[in-house]
Image (spheres, grey):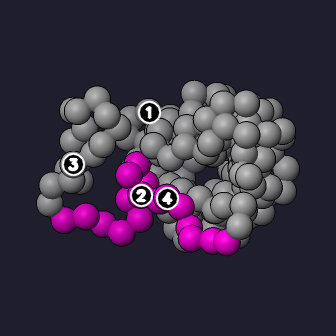
């Protein structure tokens, strides 16, 4: 896929055919009513490249309170390492500050996963605007290019 970001403004240009649900630049807000907001984050095994983390470029505003997260794994991931997990949370500290953690068994099976409690800074209203990142956690975690998941994060912001 051909993405380019050289403006320093967090803007991506895309060249060539775009696949649906591209993880790094995919996702965003779901329309809703009132103060309850929903964000959609897409995760694909190939988004990790040779690393163990990527920034989704989605930001949850300061003062927002995490309510719950749902994940739908539509293509099984192939995880390696010791007790690997896929965490969706604060970019740079996803291992401790997250709204959703997929265990190895959950990530390697097609199905739905629900989490109603946040961990770390996600268990209370966010003190600062928080960029959402996706990271592998565990001991020497790895992932292949296989795997696709959609994560919906619900939060309240008045």
Q: Callout 3: few (<14), some (14-19), or many (20+) C-alpha neighbours within 10 Å?
A: few
Which numbered disc, 2 or 4, marks the residue closer to the eye?
4
Task: Using the rendered view, name the quadrant where residue 37 is placed.
Answer: bottom right
What secondary structure is the stretch in magenta mostly built from?
loop
Residue linked to disc 1 = 51
- Between discs 1 and 4, the one toward the N terminus: 4
Task: Using the rendered view, name the quadrant where residue 31 is placed.
Answer: bottom right
> In screen coordinates, is 55 left or right of 110?
left
Which numbered disc, 1 or 3, marks the residue closer to the eye?
3
Q: Position of residue 24 (x, y in %)?
A: 40, 49
- Between discs 4 and 3, the one toward the N terminus: 3
* Dot 1: element: loop
- Between discs 2 and 3, the one toward the N terminus: 3
* Dot 2: element: loop
**Residue in view at x 21 percent, y 53 percent:** 14
Q: Position of residue 67 (x, y in %)?
A: 80, 55
* Residue segment shown in magenta: 17-33
- Between discs 1 and 2, the one toward the N terminus: 2
Disc 4/disc 3 C-alpha distance (Å)? 17 Å
Residue linked to disc 3 = 13
Q: Which mark is residue 26?
A: 2
**Residue in view at x 71 percent, y 67 percent:** 34
Task: Count how many numbered circles sit on residues in the image.
Answer: 4
Check whether the beta carbons of the residues at disc 2 and disc 4 lie within 8 A of each other.
yes
Disc 1/disc 3 C-alpha distance (Å)? 22 Å
Q: Which mark is residue 28?
A: 4
Disc 2/disc 4 C-alpha distance (Å)? 7 Å
Task: Using the rendered view, name the quadrant where residue 7 is placed.
Answer: top left
In the image, residue 80 above or below residue 117: above
Q: Position of residue 1 (x, y in %)?
A: 23, 53
Q: Residue furthest left?
A: 16
């Amino acid at each position: 896929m051909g993405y380019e970001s050289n403006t320093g403004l967090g803007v991506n240009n895309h060249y060539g055919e775009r696949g649906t649900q591209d993880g790094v630049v995919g996702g965003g807000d779901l329309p809703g009513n009132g103060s309850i907001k929903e964000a959609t984050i897409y995760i694909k095994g190939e988004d990790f490249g040779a690393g163990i983390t990527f920034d989704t470029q989605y930001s949850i505003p300061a003062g927002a309170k995490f309510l719950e997260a749902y994940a739908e794994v539509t293509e099984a991931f192939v995880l390696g390492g010791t007790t690997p997990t896929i965490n969706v949370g604060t970019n740079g500290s996803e291992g401790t500050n997250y709204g959703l953690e997929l265990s190895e068994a959950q990530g390697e099976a097609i199905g739905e996963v629900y989490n109603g409690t946040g961990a770390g800074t996600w268990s209370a209203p966010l003190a600062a605007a928080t960029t959402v990142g996706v990271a592998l956690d565990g001991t020497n975690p790895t992932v292949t290019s296989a795997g696709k998941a959609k994560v919906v994060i619900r939060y309240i912001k008045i």
